[in-house]
Every structure is written in structure tokens, then in C-alpha cells.
Image (cartoon, helix red, strand yellow):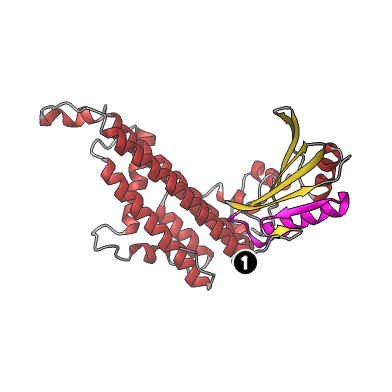
Amino acid sequence: MGCDCVNYLPPGIKLEDVAEFLSILGYPLGNFATFEGMPIYGCNFYKDEDYKYFTGVEVLAYLKDGTIHVETRTSIWRTKWDSDFHNFTVKQLQKRFGGTFISDFGKSRFLRYDGQVRIAAEAGCYFAFFHLSNDFSSAHSYLEFLKEAKNHVKTPSFPKQLLEAVHRTDPIIISTNLFLPFLVSVLEEYFKSTYIALLRYSPRKSTVIKSARIPAEELTSVSNEEQSMEEAITKSMSFQNIGKVCTYFKELDSKLDLYGTLKKPYKRRRESMFDTFDRILHQRHEFIHRSKMNPNYTIEMAFKDLETVRAAVTRVYKYLISTYKWQPWPM
């Protein structure tokens, strides 16, 4: 799903001329190819500017029936800036080459944007949560696959004293243990991305930079514009320790009490969300660094942990929205 438009250029226009003009508009160099004997050119626009752009603009130009057709597209998750640049591209193509265009809104009708407008830290935290939500969907699909696969795995009966050793060779148990490193990695990326977005616009940014110990190679990378200063700072920070994560955010803004937020009761469970994070992180570290597997970690337990982690991160994001008076996530 998304928003589409097609520019129909007059006869005689060369595909190379369209590619050159797109580069003038700000599109990076794309690729020429041939599909079923038809010359095509594709490129994508994206700009890292205060988190304004999210999906960017996709372009596919091709020669058909003697004329150039230029298809442009933005995702349904586009931002106002993605949509504006989409319309800008369509308008400039017509202005430069002539012809007509047809969008989802009709002939010679530009695309409309009626979504929420976010920028700076709000947009950065929104993007981080959006990507995490997609990763959770992937994790859920993986567990559903294991659940289905379990029905085709025959587990023989063994004496009780041998069960633990047998479980260590059970492909389902091995797979559930492998699930945890992925879950931890997406959590790490979420907290890191959220921290970077907040740090980039924080009043305490200069203080954090002064106290950070950034290796020379990382500073060189910043100088070469290969990464941001905020990204370089996080390289020396551990986001695989929930206690440290809470401390990082508290030091960045004294209002942010992630520890208290995650320690609040959840569904009358004895284990708080904070403790669930801590257990999952510890179990992952034991598995990765000591090859120590939990032989009793079932699919049902993995599903429960995934649901708890999803609820916990949603609580964190809602807490940020409430603290900074941001627009709500469209739940």
C-alpha cells in the first residue's frame, strides 16, 4: 500500500535525460537495466534531515510504446516531507519535460497528505518504535513457525534424569533459545535509536559529548560524515543491560524514570517488566558467551516473553509521549 503517480512524458525523451534530471533534483545515482526487452531506470530518494523523511520516494522510469513513463511512489507510512518531495518530483518532471501525470487522486492532481506531522526527537523516537513493531511481527512469525514445526517433531520418552540432556538436542528447544539473541538485538537497537534521537536535540548534548570517551577512529568516522556524533557516543555504551539503559536516559533527562515505569505491576504477575528484561538479557548472555542453554525454555515461555517485552516497550514509548507531550502513536 502507498501513494502512486505516473508521469507520461512526450515522445523523443531519452531515459538517460530523465536519470540526469532526477540527479539534479537530489536523487542518488540509480541503476539502468532491461526487463523483458524494456529499458528501465530505478532510483530512490532519502534524506537524513531532522528525521523529516521516513520512507523516501521510489522512482521507476521505463520506455514503453515509444514514450517514457516515470512511476513514483511513497509508502503509506510516508511523512509530510516524503509526500512533499514526491509532489515536487512529479511537478518538476512535468515542468522540465512536459506531458501529463495521473496520481491516486486523479489526472493532474497532486497527492494529498493528511497524516500527523512529527519532527526532531519526536519523529526519531516514533521511527524507532515503528521499526521495533515490525521486528516484533517477525519474531512472532518465527515462534508461530516453531509452534507448527513442533507438531511434526516426535519426542521419544526418556527417564526423568535424562530429560535435561535430551532437551539440549531438541531442535525446538534449541530454536527457542536462538530466539532470545534476536529479541535482545531488536531491543538493543530500539533503546539505542531512541537514545540517539533524544540526545541529538537534548539541552545536555554538549555535556554528554564532553564526558564521552570517543576513540580516534570513531571521531574520524564522524569527521568523514560516515556516522553522527550521537552514534559515535553510543558505540561505547551498553544497551544490553537494562539497568544501565535506565541510567543513560535518567542522565540525559532527569524527568525520565524508565526504571520506575518498568517496575510498575503488569497483569498481576510477580515478575515486573524490568525483571523480565533482566532475565531475558541474562539468559541471552549465558547462551552467547558461555554456550549455556536453558533446556526448559518452551515455545509457550517464548511467546509469553515476547508479549511482555512488546507491552513493556509500548509502555516506555507511551511514557515518552506523555512526558514530552507528543502526538500519540496510532495504536
Q: Which residue is drawn at 66% across and 43% down?
A: 216
With 173 as the anchor, is 21 left or right in this view? right
Name the one closer to the observer, 242 or 189: 189
Residue 250 magenta-highlighted: no
Name the one closer to the observer, 32 or 103: 103
- Whole-percent x and y of residue 241? 41, 50
**Span colored in magenta:** 76-104
Q: Which residue is drawn at 77% across and 53% down?
A: 101
- Whole-percent x and y of residue 176? 32, 38
Name the one closer to the observer, 201 or 89: 89
Q: Which residue lies furthest to the bottom in this view?
A: 325
Name the one closer to the observer, 88 or 131: 88
Residue 78 magenta-highlighted: yes
Q: Which residue is drawn at 59% across and 61% down?
A: 123
Q: Mark 1 points at which residue?
A: 114
Q: Is the C terminus in the top left, top right, bottom left or bottom right quadrant?
A: bottom left
Classify residue 217 by image quadrant: top right
Classify residue 117 by image quadrant: bottom right
- Whole-percent x and y of residue 61? 75, 41
Q: Which residue is drawn at 13% across and 27% down?
A: 157
Judging from the image, what secondary structure is the residue with disc 1 in? Answer: loop
Please tell me how many numbered marks the rendered image carries: 1
Q: Taking the image as drawn, is residue 328 in sight?
A: yes
Chief secondary structure of the magenta portion: helix
With 214 as the anchor, is 106 left or right in this view? right
Residue 255 higher or lower than 308, as above or below: below
- Residue type for callout 1: Asp
Q: Taking the image as drawn, is residue 285 in sight?
A: no
